[in-house]
Structures are given as C-alpha cells and as structure tokens.
Image (cartoon, rainbow, N blue to C red):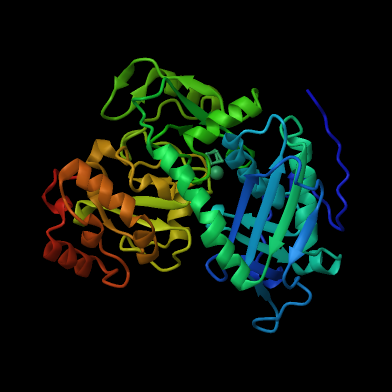
Amino acid sequence: IKIKVTKIDVPVSVAAAFEGERVRKDTMFAEFGGNKTPAWELVTTGDLAELEDHKITVIGPDIDDAMFEDGKTVRLPLGILVEVAGKEMQKDFETVLERRIHYFMNYIDGAMHVGQRNTVWIRLTKEAYEKGFRLKHIGEVLYAKMRADFDNVVDKCQVTIYTKKEDVEEIYEERVKPIYVQRDDRMSALTDESVEEFYTCLLCQSFAPSHVCIITPERLGLCGAVSWLDAKATKQLDPTGPNQPVVKGQAIDERLGIWASVNEAVATNSQGAVEKVTLYSILEDPMTSCGCFECICGIMPEANGVVIVNREFSDVSPVGMTFGELASMTGGGVQTPGFMGHGRQLIGSKKFMSAEGGLERIVWMPKELKDDVAERLNKAVKEMTGIENFADMVCDETIAIESEAVLEFLESKGHPALAMDPIM
Ligand code: SF4
Ligand code: ZN
C-alpha cells in the first residue's frame, strides 16, 4: 500500500473527514450551478508536450470581485476544465478522474459538491471565504489530488476555471457537450447480455455502509456518474479499489434479473445486511439506494405506473411527496420495495424495471427531466413497443400534479400503463 502525504497550498483543511459536510444557505458565501447558473466539469486528456504541469488559471471574476446577487450570496457560472496527460493515460480513464472531482471537492473544509457533468452544484462557506479561500484553490486541490491519487497515469495536470457566463456556455456547447455525447454513445452500444461481468461499486459506503451498487452496461450507478465502462476503467486503474468485477455466470431468473454471483457480491460487501437483489425489478428485492441518486422512481398505484422525480425538482410529486421526502425513505442503503433511486440515464434503458413492464410504466416526470431524457426514452419505447413519441404521453407538473388530473391526462393520451397488468 502506498501512503501519500501531499501538502496542498490552500488556506483551509482538505481531508476525507469533511466529506459529508453540507453547506446550508445561512453559512454559504458563494454558489455555482444547481440550476441557478450554468456549470459543468470535465476531465480530458491533453497533449503531454503541450500541457504545463500545475498551471492553474481562473478566467473571469473570482468570488470576491463578483456581484452579490441578493446582498449576501455570490452566484457565478462555473466551468472546471481539468486537462491531464501521461504516457499511461487512456481516454477511458477520463470519466473516472472526472468523478473524483466530486470527492476531492467535498474533502475541502467549507465546500459542498453535488452532481456531475453539467448538473454540478457547488457551495462555499463564508468561513472558507474569510480564511482566504478563492477559486484558484479549487484548482490547487484538484491538481494535487489528481497527481497524488492517479500518479500512475497522470504526469501533467492543468486546471482552468471559467466564470464568465459566455465562456461557460460557449465552451460547453463546443467542447464539453460533444465529449459527454460521445461517451454516452459508446456506452449505449453495450447490453447486459453482451458482457461477461458486472461490477460492484462501494464508493458510497463511507456514508451508507450497507449500500452496494451493481453496475451493468444497461444500468449505471444511481449517482449517474459511474457507468459500466467507468467501473471497468477504475478496476484497471485501481485493482483493489471500489469497483470489482462480478462474473455473471448463469442467471437464476432473467426476467427479474437475479444472479447468484450478484447476490453473493452484495451479501459479502454489505456485511450480510442485504442478501439478495434483483437488477430489473422495483418490487422484488430492489437494489438499495445510498443518498446520491439523481432520481427516485416510485409507484403511483392508481395510475398503474410509476412517477420519477429528479433531485432538482422541489415541488410535491403526484405520489404526495417531494424529492426530499422520497429520498429520506428510499436512501441509506435499505431496500424499499416500490421505490428506487436511480440515474437519469436509466430512463431510456430497456432494463428499467423491465420485470414490471419497463419504461411504458412511466406516467409522470418533472418537465425538465422529461425534456432531458425524451430522445432516448422515445427511441427505446419505440423499439420495444412501436409507440411513437412516448414522452408526450407522460404527464408533468405543467400539465398536472394532482392525482385525478394526472389520470385524466393519461386517459386522454391513451397511456399504455392504464391497460397493463396491475402493477401491484
Ligand atoms: Fe458508486 Fe453507486 Fe455511489 Fe455512484 S451511487 S458512487 S455507483 S456506490
Ligand atoms: Zn451514493
């Protein structure tokens, strides 16, 4: 085991101990993303000869020269571009390094990081600001941790932080989004049947000790940040790390998605707390949820289907609960039949609760989420059932939230869930 002690030149402490820290409104000084400003983060491979190691650049206003939006809080757009290079670096490693940004940022005393890619949400405390913490220190932390934790593949690392709205938006469209799309396309070519092994992910056990994600090509981790390719790359980068292969073997039940190998992996890694999970059912032994799921799906019995609520949606959903209320009963590493945390990408997967009828069961989603997933969702439902433009049959908060009105809408659209077998 290599023990690395790195001195990071920042005015606050940086340690895994600060990981669970939330920054609430009253202690917050600055905020980025979280639907309030555009924000993204990207790790990409640069040219070894061209990159300048430890070059940290902030382009645009810093937190002390930005305008206060409400007299108390600084809100800025944010683009975090981490460029790495190394003789052993591979493109497939980029997403693994990128996900670590989440952990590295949360190690900072006075910082909170939620989400990933272009859904990041970052807060900094007044206290950190008063101690002298500025945006370049985010660069310092990311630089130091990338070099320390990935020294086998990262020989050079430079960090550029953008805070001008036009930069953040333009670079996103031109450089960042095409990379996200490319990654997703590569992933969507794989199916659960086409691979020999799934992977475990134990990264969230630091706060949900009995939680184990099982990552398959058609079911990414519920944080939305760990795909099967990511898990595979992590195993290569860190052979004894959080992602270990589970050699599938023969399925016990293909419809529910039960494998002896998966049950064994979950039982061992949850220290016996969870003994069996299905990969394709929300009702029978559904996978556990930690706390960082992008979405929660829950049964709406009267509609014979499910509603999905994403983290960014703050209103009450048709099941009578907000995301937060749903999260408090679904999270923590327990199995809650009828409810399940999952990633956005799963909406569009043919394995999405396929044991209960799959994507066709979706009756309601917040509009922002629906628009975001519509293309993939429509394509998958069309391929499976022949139904065109399925997303148009799914209700959202601009149409109705209240149960009866939702049902009325579903009926007017001839939503397929209404004619399916009773969901429970
Ligand atoms: Fe890993 Fe799952 Fe946590 Fe994502 S939610 S980091 S996949 S354990
Ligand atoms: Zn988690």
Q: Quadrant of residue 325?
A: bottom left
**Depicted 105 relative to depicted 365: above or below:** above
Residue most extreme to the bottom: 71
Position of residue 27 relative to residue 348, above or below, is: below
Task: Please state the horizontal and vertical placement of residue 66, each as a whole percent of the image.
Answer: 73, 77
Taking depth in this image into account, of 195 and 128 the one nearest to the observer is: 195
Left or right: 317, with 186 as reference point: left
**Residue farthest to the front, as pictured:** 49
Question: Is residue 312 rendered to the left or right of residue 352?
Answer: right
Give the percent coordinates (x, y) of residue 416.
15, 52
Residue 165: image location, x then y, percent: 61, 72
Residue 138 to residue 227: above or below: below
Q: Quadrant of residue 308?
A: bottom left
Residue at (83%, 33%) from the top-left corner? 4
Image quadrant where one finds the C terminus: top left
Ligand 2: quadrant of the figure: top right
Pick the front one: 120 or 152: 152
Can the viewer see residue 23 in this picture? yes
| Residue 56 position within the rendered picture, expressed as x and y whole percent measured from the top left | 79, 56
| Residue at the (23%, 52%) spot, across then down | 301
Q: Residue at x 64, y 61 (%)?
A: 79
Residue drawn at (47%, 29%) of the image: 274
